[in-house]
Image (spheres, grey):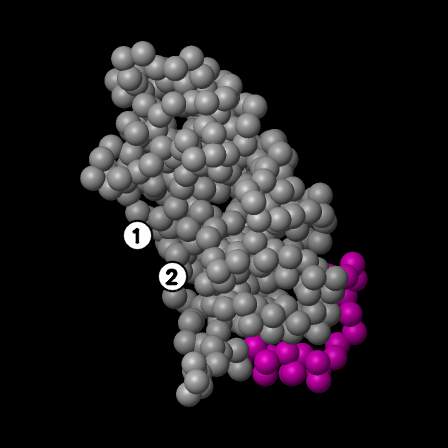
């Protein structure tokens, strides 16, 4: 079983006080578990009691980034193409006279959530119905590629495409290519009606397993000396492909651009897989750092801001002198993380 080597923050050039500031704010924001990797070493991890690091946790839309990797493998193997029309993949599900914009939609538009749906137009998914058919029969308001609209349906169609071309459910397709090499347990991945792995959400992961995914991305598809996925796909998927927005709520970290099922960050270099309630796998290439958060914070768009405010300033270029007292204080604070008990007037 793979485990990251351990080091103190100071050994990896990280101010222990920055880790403590991050952990305390994380606790206040209804954080559940986190892990910080620097230079390939685990320098800090913590769980807010009663949560435990070893417990699987819903990661919601972080699942989309795994879907993006599945598409990358399928492209690498010649099973898919970025410019292929989506309508031609599922002709049996189209309405009798599909709109012209549906005919123009390509796989790349699914990846970037620029399908052409207007806000509110995206297909609704009734568990009793065929989710894929709902999408294929939806009306496409704008020419694909012209408007960004966050769209769970697009990610689910990507999963269906991987299954149709590979002959395997996406979860099974990823198992020997990504999940098993990294030692990630995704055995309870949710499925849509019809037995299709959900591409938009449905994964439950441990903090340590999600951190391996982040390190794999940081290493541009290389894992323990083996290039599992072409580095050019990692670069493309995590680069700013299109502008993005978060609707009516100002959220700079969600307005920094979108890649292929990944969000960009406001520093211009970092990116993340992000999910509802503060699930994040943030990769900071300039600092050679990965930060994973699993949480239950209602305003999830504030979690990335908190990371950049508290931890990132403490990521320094060189190792720091040993400071036993600071390290002991940090370890004691991490061990004490806990949800406070309710008081009588709560």
Seen in the picture, residue 310 relative to 140 is either above or below; the reply is below
Left or right side of 166 for 13: right
User: Mark 1 touching mark 2, by CB under 8 A?
Assistant: yes
Q: What element carries label 1?
A: loop
Residue ID at (30%, 52%): 188
Q: Position of residue 135 (x, y in %)?
A: 34, 28
Q: Give the range drawn in magenta.
A: 315-335
> Which residue is at 71% across, 54% downward?
287
Can residue 102 be seen here? The reply is yes
**Residue 244 bears which disc, if any?**
none
Q: Which residue lies furthest to the left in this view?
A: 128
Magenta span contains residue 326: yes
- Tell me where residue 106 appears, x and y as whole percent: 46, 20
Tally of numbered tags: 2
How far across and down, in percent of the image, does residue 315 sit? Answer: 73, 61
Q: Name which residue lies at 70% across and 69% down.
A: 18
293 falls in the magenta region? no
Q: Which mark is residue 56?
A: 2
Residue positioned 66% across, 72% down in the render: 21
Residue 97 position, x and y percent, is: 31, 12
Question: Local crowd at mark 2 within 10 Å, few (<14), some, or many (≥20)?
Answer: some
As drawn, the residue found furthest toward the bottom would be 344
When the figure is inspected, residue 154 is found, relative to residue 225, above or below; the finding is above
Task: Point out the image quarter for the C terminus.
Answer: bottom left
In which quadrant will I find the N terminus? bottom left
Of residue 250 and residue 197, the one placed in the foreground of this image is: 250
Label number found at residue 188: 1
Q: Earlier in the sequence, mark 1 or mark 2?
A: 2
Regarding mark 2 in the picture, which secondary structure is present there? loop
Depth check: give the residue in front, 160 or 225: 160
């Amino acid at each position: 079983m793979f485990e990251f080597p351990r080091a103190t923050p100071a050994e990896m050039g990280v101010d222990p006080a920055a880790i403590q500031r991050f952990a305390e704010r994380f606790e206040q924001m209804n954080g559940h578990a986190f892990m910080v990797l620097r230079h390939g070493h685990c320098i800090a991890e913590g769980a807010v009691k009663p949560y435990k690091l070893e417990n699987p946790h819903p990661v919601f839309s972080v699942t989309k980034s795994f879907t993006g990797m599945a598409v990358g493998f399928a492209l690498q193997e010649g099973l898919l193409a970025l410019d292929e029309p989506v309508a031609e993949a599922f002709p049996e599900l189209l309405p009798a006279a599909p709109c012209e914009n549906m005919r123009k939609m390509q796989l790349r538009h699914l990846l970037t959530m620029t399908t052409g749906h207007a806000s509110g137009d995206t297909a609704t998914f009734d568990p009793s119905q065929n989710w894929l058919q709902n999408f294929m029969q939806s009306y496409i308001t704008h020419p694909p590629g012209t408007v960004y609209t966050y769209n769970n349906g697009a990610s689910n169609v990507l999963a269906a495409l991987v299954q149709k071309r590979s002959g395997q459910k996406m979860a099974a397709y990823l198992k020997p290519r990504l999940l098993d090499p990294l030692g990630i347990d995704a055995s309870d991945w949710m499925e849509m009606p019809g037995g299709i792995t959900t591409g938009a959400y449905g994964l439950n992961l441990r903090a340590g397993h999600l951190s391996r995914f982040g390190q794999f991305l940081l290493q541009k598809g290389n894992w323990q000396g083996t290039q599992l996925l072409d580095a050019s796909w990692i670069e493309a998927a995590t680069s700013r492909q299109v502008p993005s927005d978060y609707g009516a709520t100002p959220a700079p970290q969600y307005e920094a651009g979108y890649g292929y099922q990944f969000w960009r960050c406001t520093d211009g270099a970092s990116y993340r897989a992000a999910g509802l309630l503060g699930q994040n796998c943030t990769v900071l290439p300039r600092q050679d750092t990965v930060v994973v958060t699993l949480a239950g914070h209602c305003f999830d768009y504030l979690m990335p801001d908190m990371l950049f405010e508290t931890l990132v300033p403490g990521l320094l270029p060189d190792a720091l002198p040993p400071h036993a007292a600071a390290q002991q204080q940090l370890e004691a604070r991490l061990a004490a993380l806990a949800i406070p008990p309710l008081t009588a007037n709560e």
